[in-house]
Image (tube, rainbow, N blue to C red):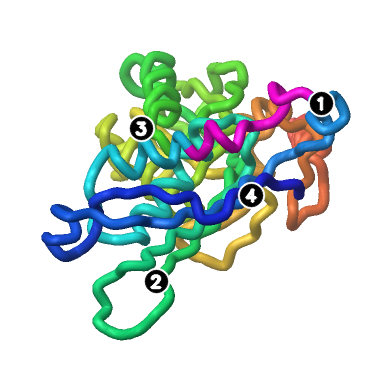
């Protein structure tokens, strides 16, 4: 992956655990590698197809001077998030924050923290069969989109579907969204559960009625062993209400375990439904 680097940008700011650090201030040194595709910008000699390193430096300086923090860990995280969410072309970032005048009380060159953060692609199935179903889904989509850590890139058609598993309930409206996120799978799942709680989702009946259902289907091509976040979703290949909208957004995405494209999984499921009808 191509990248743009800046080494040891100097910013005078007021951060530190000690109160005197926040009062007197000190110099911080920030280095970063911004990962993005530079081929077209280089071929056409056009800054508009790249990201200005000067602009990124001003973004970092503005962040450093906006508030006072205790930890350089927090500063490194904040710089990474600021750059990733400000510049659409950046896919990933490596940030090092150095503190050459840290009050350690021993001879040293500098204290530093380095973080690497990247955008990840996630597909989330959405559904509701209680209340104002479509309105609830649109509000949930908006909540994700304004979270500051996740952006909804594409939304499938929202369709009315019959319930699956537990059939003695109202019809659903279902769809799938494609999201780019800075969160880990576990943090993303926790965030989705929090949104469900906001809409008073209750889990009294397995596969029963719900105001809002948010299921993480894919996260990059990750396969997990985490029982709390099972990826890919273990029952997605059995659910037409997932595969149909998913095939709109990513028909040729390959299931990392089944080694089949989404469009082929849908065709197989529909064929099985016809043969059993």
- Badge 1 vs badge 4, beta-carbon distance below 8 Å: no
Is 55 one of the magenta-colored residues?
yes
Expressed as whole percent of the image width and height from the top left, the position of residue 217 reads: 59, 44
Furthest residue to the bottom? 106
Furthest residue to the right? 43
Q: In the picture shown, does residue 74 fall above or below 38?
A: below
Q: Would you call the spot at circle 3 few (<14 residues within 10 Å), some (14-19), or many (20 or more)?
A: many
Q: Which residues are magenta?
A: 46-57
Q: Is residue 248 visible?
A: no
Magenta-drawn stretch, dominant element (helix, strand or loop):
helix
Give the left or right position of residue 109, taking residue 155 as reference. left
The span from disc 3 to disc 1 (Cα, nearest Å) is: 53 Å
Secondary structure under tag 2 reads: strand
Q: Which mark is residue 111?
A: 2
Secondary structure under tag 3 reads: loop
Could you tell me which residue is drawn at 23 percent across and 60 percent down?
A: 16
The span from disc 1 to disc 4 (Cα, nearest Å) is: 18 Å
Secondary structure under tag 4 reads: strand
Could you tell me which residue is drawn at 71 percent across and 25 percent down?
A: 47
Q: Nearer the viewer, mark 4 or mark 3?
A: 4
Give the left or right position of residue 94, taking residue 76 as reference. right
Q: In the picture shown, does residue 62 fall above or below 23?
A: above
The span from disc 2 to disc 1 (Cα, nearest Å) is: 38 Å
Expressed as whole percent of the image width and height from the top left, the position of residue 249 reads: 69, 27
Q: Would you call the spot at circle 2 few (<14 residues within 10 Å), some (14-19), or many (20 or more)?
A: some
Q: Is residue 106 visible?
A: yes
Q: Which mark is residue 5?
A: 4
């Amino acid at each position: 992956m191509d990248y743009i680097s800046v080494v040891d940008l100097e910013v005078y700011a007021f951060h530190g655990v000690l109160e005197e650090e926040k009062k007197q201030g000190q110099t911080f040194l920030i280095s970063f590698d911004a990962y993005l595709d530079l081929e077209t910008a280089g071929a056409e000699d056009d800054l508009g197809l790249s990201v200005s390193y000067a602009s990124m430096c001003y973004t970092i300086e503005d962040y450093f001077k906006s508030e006072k923090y205790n930890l350089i860990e927090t500063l490194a995280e904040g710089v990474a998030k600021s750059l990733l969410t400000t510049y659409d072309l950046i896919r990933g970032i490596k940030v090092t924050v150095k503190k050459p005048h840290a009050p350690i009380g021993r001879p040293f060159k500098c204290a530093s923290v380095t973080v690497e953060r990247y955008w990840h692609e996630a597909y989330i199935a959405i559904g509701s069969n209680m209340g104002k179903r479509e309105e609830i889904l649109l509000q949930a989509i908006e909540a994700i989109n304004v979270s500051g850590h996740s952006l909804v890139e594409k939304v499938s058609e929202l369709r009315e579907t019959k319930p699956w598993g537990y059939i003695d309930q109202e019809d659903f409206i279902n769809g799938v969204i494609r999201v780019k996120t800075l969160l880990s799978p576990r943090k993303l799942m926790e965030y989705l559960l929090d949104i469900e709680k906001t809409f008073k989702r209750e889990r009294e009946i397995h596969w029963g009625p719900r105001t809002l259902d948010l299921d993480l289907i894919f996260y990059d091509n990750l396969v997990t062993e985490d029982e709390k976040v099972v990826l890919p979703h273990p029952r997605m290949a059995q659910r037409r209400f997932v595969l149909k909208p998913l095939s709109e957004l990513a028909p040729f995405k390959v299931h990392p375990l089944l080694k089949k494209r989404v469009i082929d999984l849908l065709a197989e499921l529909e064929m099985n439904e016809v043969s059993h009808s």
